[in-house]
């Protein structure tokens, strides 16, 4: 349901009734919703989740995702994933993921492609400016918004905040927290009229100014769900989901406390999948049909089983509409510095089960990047069948080594089998998709052609398997590869035939031929380029520090998704060279893959004090670079940096003829191209400016 900005006037043979926005309850999450959501980040995904990088993927993402949840987007006073929120209003939206302009462009680009953007909303707690109890003063559209010490819960940090406040002449709220205490930052008192005023204005701004369509509320156990109801009824987001990381009973109670104005992440769904793939309790794949243990509810003295919200055994599926299902997120994934609680294997099978079940599936970015081909194909089948968040399902078979479910959508049924064992379905089903430890089957009664290779860009010739889904034993497949509609006289293939998708662009159309009639046509579009092994190359990063007087050395603190980061404040670099009469500190780095890059912070000093003399972050470096450190600092006290690479002749390698012959060419963001336009590229492992001559 779209946000409502109207007044309905009913004029019948009865008195006139007028309804306005204040009378309309927020919906929480739409019923029979068929969309799939992408979590567009993982922990420390500062490169992959840059606003500009996500925007570049909009065309591809729009084919598979209706919603993308992105990190909390305001400035947090330093490098941050957004959960130590400091600012709430525009003017402070230059974050670790890009600028405010880039954020607005991303949201608008997504909207134009049919993708809704979900905001990460952190209002349980907030970061302070300079001491334990102060908050930023912000002005938005002429209105001043500022929280004060009296907006902090009386029992924050187990009473430690109150002790500090009293000793330093401050007062806190007289009200205790309405939820769980969190010691990381100041817990906000949501009974405060000032907190409510600030939060409501913030949420309206996210929807009406920045253009988000909904909210993912962080740490909702930290305050009563009744306040989420208040905020959602005021702002009226199209979508709302809360992170209530707990037992099913607690999650359900929170959804009820919001008066169903919000959905919740189905954590117990995630844990039953984890139990299955990790073989917890020795039950193997049978764990998908079991609860994740039990939960003792002290208030009523009852022990409750931890069924997933979407499970048949939980309230007969009554809470499926409010379940956002997932199998991994940024808090459960394995990190380089934390084991956490990850899936240890069978990522494909886990996602196959997720995408075959009711609820609204949320795909984790890491899984999307690593398993894109399979996940695309799974979503293709889910959409074809019309599975939605309130679909019904039945367990078809369960075994230590496999589990099978049949889910009914608006257009048919999907039989999904996951696990290491072999299960043979009834003869009236045909396999349309298979991968490592998973298979999807459609009933033959659906009478359609199917292609297992999803749309996309690929390297090297591909194989696409064509399947006839039909109860007619004489059905054949007909297909074209030039985008024209197949007819009875088109190329024919038997069900199960694999055809080669050659280099270049191919629009494949496949239809089901019964007699002389072609029906059930499916279309796929492929762009295939010749694969070429990546050749590692070296980049040199040069820094001029004359404006800040760093004459003896510069610390290069570096990190990246595919490399180990340095320990703060980084490598002490003393090597220099002279270019164009200027002194430059420099250090080289090896780029080992097309999507490799290095991020930097430059500084002087030691671990104890380098933060007082450091620059802003420089991200996604994979070519030779020259940087100039300004004597100007930003609002966080960090030195600004200018990229002056194009001003120095020793790195302006010009190739107007590049792209001919055997050249291997990549864009700066790691995409291989064959016909580059003017600009800067990596050609055969070296940075090249194409299409122009040096003056």
Image (cartoon, rainbow, N blue to C red):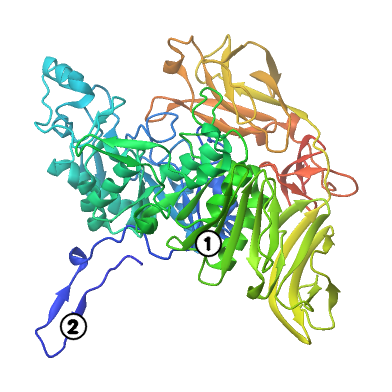
Locate the C terminus and report the quarter of the image it occupies. top right
Observer-nearest of 241 and 686: 241
Q: Is residue 488 above or below residue 666?
A: below
Locate the N terminus and report the quarter of the image it occupies. bottom left
Observer-nearest of 242 and 568: 242
Q: Is residue 239 visible?
A: no
**Residue carrying label 1:** 407
Question: Residue shown at 51%/16% (left/top)?
Answer: 568
Q: Is residue 525 above or below residue 653?
A: below
Q: Is residue 383 above or below residue 235?
A: below
Q: Quadrant of residue 642?
A: top right
Q: Is residue 243 left or right of residue 52?
A: left
> Which numbered circle lies on residue 10?
2
Q: Disc 1 or disc 2, which is closer to the eye?
A: 1
Q: Position of residue 511 (x, y in %)?
A: 74, 76
Q: Is residue 188 visible?
A: yes
């Amino acid at each position: 349901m779209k946000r409502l900005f109207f007044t309905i006037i009913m004029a019948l043979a009865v008195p006139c009734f007028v309804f306005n926005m204040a009378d309309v309850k927020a919906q929480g999450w739409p019923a029979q919703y068929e969309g799939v959501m992408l979590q567009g980040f993982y922990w420390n995904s500062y490169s992959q989740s840059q606003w500009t990088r996500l925007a570049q993927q909009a065309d591809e993402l729009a084919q598979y995702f209706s919603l993308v949840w992105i990190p909390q987007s305001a400035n947090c006073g330093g490098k941050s994933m957004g959960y130590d929120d400091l600012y709430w209003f525009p003017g402070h939206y230059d974050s670790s993921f890009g600028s405010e302009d880039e954020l607005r462009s991303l949201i608008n680009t997504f909207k134009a492609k049919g993708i809704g953007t979900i905001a990460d909303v952190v209002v349980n707690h907030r970061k302070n400016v300079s001491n334990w109890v102060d908050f930023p003063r912000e002005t938005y559209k002429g209105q001043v918004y500022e929280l004060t010490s009296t907006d902090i819960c009386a029992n924050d940090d187990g009473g430690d905040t109150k002790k500090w406040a009293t000793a330093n002449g401050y007062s806190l709220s007289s009200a205790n927290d309405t939820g769980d205490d969190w010691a990381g930052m100041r817990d906000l008192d949501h009974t405060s009229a000032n907190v409510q005023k600030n939060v409501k204005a913030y949420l309206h701004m996210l929807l009406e100014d920045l253009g988000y369509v909904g909210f993912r509320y962080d740490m909702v156990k930290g305050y009563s769900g009744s306040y989420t109801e208040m905020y959602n009824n005021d702002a009226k987001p199209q979508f709302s989901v809360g992170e209530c990381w707990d037992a099913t009973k607690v999650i359900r109670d929170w959804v009820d406390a919001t008066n169903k104005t919000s959905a919740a992440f189905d954590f117990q769904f995630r844990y039953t999948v984890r139990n299955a793939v990790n073989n917890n309790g020795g039950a193997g794949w049978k764990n998908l049909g079991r609860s994740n243990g039990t939960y003792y509810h002290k208030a009523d003295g009852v022990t409750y089983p931890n069924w997933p919200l979407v499970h048949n055994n939980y309230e007969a599926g009554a809470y499926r509409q409010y379940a956002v299902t997932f199998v991994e997120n940024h808090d459960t994934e394995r990190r380089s510095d934390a084991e956490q609680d990850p899936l240890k294997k069978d990522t494909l099978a886990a996602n196959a089960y997720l995408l075959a079940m009711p609820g609204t599936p949320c795909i984790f970015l890491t899984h999307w990047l690593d398993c894109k081909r399979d996940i695309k194909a799974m979503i293709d089948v889910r959409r074809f069948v019309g599975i939605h968040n309130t679909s019904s399902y039945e367990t078809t078979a369960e075994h230590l080594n496999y589990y099978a479910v049949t889910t009914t959508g608006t257009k048919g049924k999907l039989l999904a089998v996951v696990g290491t064992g072999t299960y043979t379905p009834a003869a009236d089903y045909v396999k349309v998709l298979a991968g490592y430890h998973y298979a999807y089957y459609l009933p033959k009664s659906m009478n359609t052609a199917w292609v297992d290779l999803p749309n996309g860009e690929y390297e090297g010739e591909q194989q696409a398997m064509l399947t006839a889904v039909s109860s007619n034993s004489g059905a054949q497949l007909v297909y074209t590869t030039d985008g024209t509609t197949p007819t009875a006289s088109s190329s024919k293939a038997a069900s199960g035939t694999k055809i080669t998708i050659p280099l270049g662009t191919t629009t494949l159309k496949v239809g089901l031929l019964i007699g002389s009639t072609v029906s059930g046509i499916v279309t796929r579009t492929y762009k295939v380029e010749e694969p070429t092994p990546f050749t590692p190359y070296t980049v040199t990063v040069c820094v001029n520090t004359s404006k800040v007087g760093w004459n003896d050395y510069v610390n290069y603190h570096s990190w990246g998704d595919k490399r180990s980061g340095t320990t703060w404040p980084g490598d002490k670099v003393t090597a220099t060279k002279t270019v164009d009469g200027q002194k430059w500190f420099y250090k080289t780095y090896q780029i080992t893959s097309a999507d490799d890059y290095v991020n930097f912070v430059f500084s002087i000093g030691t671990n104890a004090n380098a933060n007082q003399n450091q620059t802003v972050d420089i991200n996604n470096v994979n070519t030779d670079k020259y940087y100039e450190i300004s004597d100007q600092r930003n609002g966080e006290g960090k030195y600004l940096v200018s990229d002056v690479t194009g001003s120095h002749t020793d790195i302006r390698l010009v190739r107007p003829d590049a792209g001919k012959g055997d050249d291997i060419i990549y864009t700066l963001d790691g995409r291989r191209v064959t016909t580059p336009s003017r600009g800067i590229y990596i050609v055969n492992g070296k940075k090249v400016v194409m299409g122009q001559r040096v003056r």
